[in-house]
Image (cartoon, helix red, strand yellow):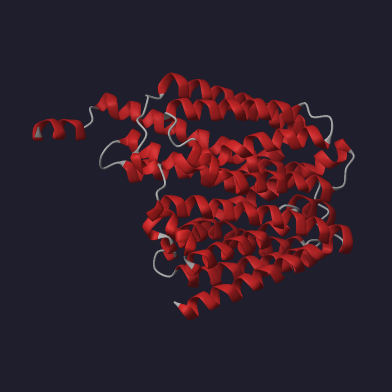
Amino acid sequence: MHSSSVADATLSPAETSRSGLQILIMAVAAFIIVTTEFLIVGLLPALSRELNISIALAGQVVTLFAFTVMVFGPLLTAKLAHVERKKLFTLILMVFAASNVLAAIATNIWVLALARFIPALALPVFWGTASETAGQLAGPGQSGKAVGRVYLGITAALVFGVPLGTLAADSVGWRGSFWILAAISLLIGVLMHVVMPKLPVSASSHPDNKQTAILGQPRFLAHLLLSILTFTALFTAYTYLADILERLGNIPAGQVGWWLMGFGAVGMLGNHLAGSMVDRRPLAAMVLFLVLAGAGMLAAVPLAPHHIGLMVALVAWGIGYTALFVVCQVRVMQAGAQAQALAATMNISAANAGIGLGAILGGIGIERYGLESIGVIAALIAALAIVVTLLLMRRQ
């Protein structure tokens, strides 16, 4: 029996190569799925012009996606936890392919809203099951590396999905961006069906009473509130960053994508800094990166016409923005250590609540006080998040 276990734990070169390809497909799937959520941010100016709607109304498709993930994410993830993973992921990618086609042919805001609502139902299911599946594919002793590779696809989408969509829109139009996403979703879905093995569903995928007990812990709920505030602050401004660059920075539409690409590249530094700090002092990291992001958002608007100053503001904003994704996820998982999978799913819902609220508040700010108000509103919410963080540190 012992020799059999050892043999099972040692993968042949062919098996290692095959599992590496399968994990690569998972990482690309993660990139496509998360890019579908955030790509719309870079397309808002072009989309609002063609559909003849205000930028504030266009921004509400961001709210719709985020609130759908928030409301349905935990429920659908739990309901579909028993579905065999190959079948589940292939179906998710086909849903994304179809919904991106629908977005590409949308003739009004209502069709576009439907095209955003459908994939938002499937995204949290992928988020909630991808890490476990990557570990199964890699085999014993390799799960950490496998999960890291899949999350690299997610991080790349968070950082580069918006600018890549913006650049594609400059070349092929905003509809072309959705057509490209649809084609890649279909391709990865086919590869998933052909290459992925059938995988048994882990018993840990089913939540029990011990896990859900964290939902009654005030400290855990306070950490979720902090995530909501953080993402509300970030997306009050980030949802309309492309518009800030165009209208306030007087940057030609064809160059906005490159500015967003620079913002994303700087964000990779934030990802690195967060990873080195968050395990030791997650709440101190929250304060640091909230201050950086808040200062950057506050300064970006008045400095927009002065491009050197704008770059400095975007560096601070970009580092804080990307770092806070990592810090929030780790912080909430530490707060719910006895049920980390559920804690991670709840943080995703909290983050999307903030994304949706941010898009709403930013839109209201634009309608009532003008685009110039965005930085102040976002910075005030960031300041509130800092206060909550300090209160948590005091009670720790």
Q: Residue at x 76, y 55 (%)?
A: 360
Identify the residue at the far front of this view: 209
Task: Look at 71% across and 57% down and name the residue there.
Answer: 358
Percent position (x, y) of residue 96? Answer: 61, 30
Quadrant of the image for the N terminus?
Answer: top left
Q: In this view, does 156 lie above or below 294?
A: above
Taking the image as shown, residue 35 lies to the left or right of residue 82, namely: right
Percent x, y for residue 348?
Answer: 55, 51
Q: Which of 288 and 233 is in front in this view?
A: 233
- Quarter of the rendering occupied by the C terminus: bottom left
Drawn side of residue 179 relative to residue 88, left or right: right
Q: In which quarter of the image is residue 197?
A: top left
Can residue 184 be seen by looking at this rendering?
A: no
Q: Is residue 86 visible?
A: yes
On screen, residue 376 above or below 196: below
Residue shown at 13% from the left, 30% from the top: 4
Q: What is the count of numbered marks?
A: 0
Q: Residue furthest bottom?
A: 394
The residue located at (57%, 43%) in the rendering is: 157
Q: In this view, does 316 lie to the left or right of 340?
A: right
From the viewer's perspective, is residue 224 above or below residue 83? Answer: below
Location of residue 84 in the rendering, given as x and y in whole percent from the top left corner = 42, 28
Percent of width and height locating residue 212: 44, 54
